[in-house]
Image (cartoon, grey):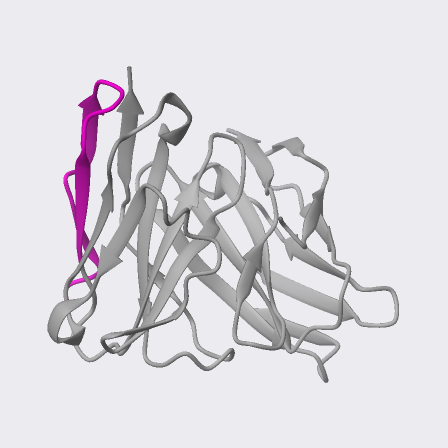
Amino acid sequence: EAGVVQSPRYKIIEKKQPVAFWCNPISGHNTLYWYLQNLGQGPELLIRYENEEAVDDSQLPKDRFSAERLKGVDSTLKIQPAELGDSAVYLCASSLSGSFANEQFFGPGTRLTVL
Amino acid sequence: SQQGEEDPQALSIQEGENATMNCSYKTSINNLQWYRQNSGRGLVHLILIRSNEREKHSGRLRVTLDTSKKSSSLLITASRAADTASYFCATNTGGFKTIFGAGTRLFVKA
């Protein structure tokens, strides 16, 4: 069974440029998460989807970040415009449901560098 | 903000020794999970312990939970070089939110 797929794996852009990350969750997983991980820190939740609905986006900086999950499968996270402080690893994860007892499966992440 | 705080921040041991990592948290939880992250495989779920459980085992892993002290420990017995990674505790509170700590970096010397 394929795991969570993310692309690209690495992205280098200049500040003020837009950038987008793509995630394909494990088949059958209704819940999808986007996390941000800074160097030396644990992942921090940006947004959680239950199917197509964003049920927790309280930590998403909505002035520059946006996300969508069309058809309740793949998801895209966008930053426009990017700032130097956005350099981090962006992780996507999925689980069977949003139940707190469910294991989350993580993708390899996209390492973003903003110059 | 991160609820879990791992201790120590970094740990270096010899292969064959046991490694113990601790996690403290601030608010009541439904469960606590431990994850491992290394450069090759990303974040991988290791074990989940519910708030009404006190100890759980999985292979060479032993997790304890003390809700009165709001703390958990992860013990890796007979460590191997392949156990070199960062280990994170993640707490689940009301609202189904998972909050990760900053992690313990474990280095196992061959």
**Residue B8 at x, y percent in the picture:** 72, 38
Toward the front, the furthest residue is: A63
**Residue B107 at x, y percent in the picture:** 55, 31
Residue at 33% from the left image edge and 48% from the top image edge: A91
Q: Left of B47 or right of it: where is B70?
A: right
- Is B76 drawn above or below residue A53 in the view shown? above
- Is A99 drawn above or below residue B88 in the view shown? below
**Residue A83 at x, y percent in the picture:** 34, 26
Residue at 66% from the left image edge and 45% from the top image edge: B19
**Residue B103 at x, y percent in the picture:** 59, 43
Residue A16 figure quarter: top left
Residue at 87% from the left image edge and 64% from the top image edge: B69
Q: Can residue A58 be seen at all in this image of the molecule? A: yes
Residue A2 figure quarter: bottom left
- Is A54 drawn above or below residue A81 in the view shown? below
Magenta extent = A1-23
Toward the top, the furthest residue is: A115
- Between A30 and B109, the one lying in front of the other is A30
Q: Magenta includes B65?
A: no
Toward the right, the furthest residue is: B68
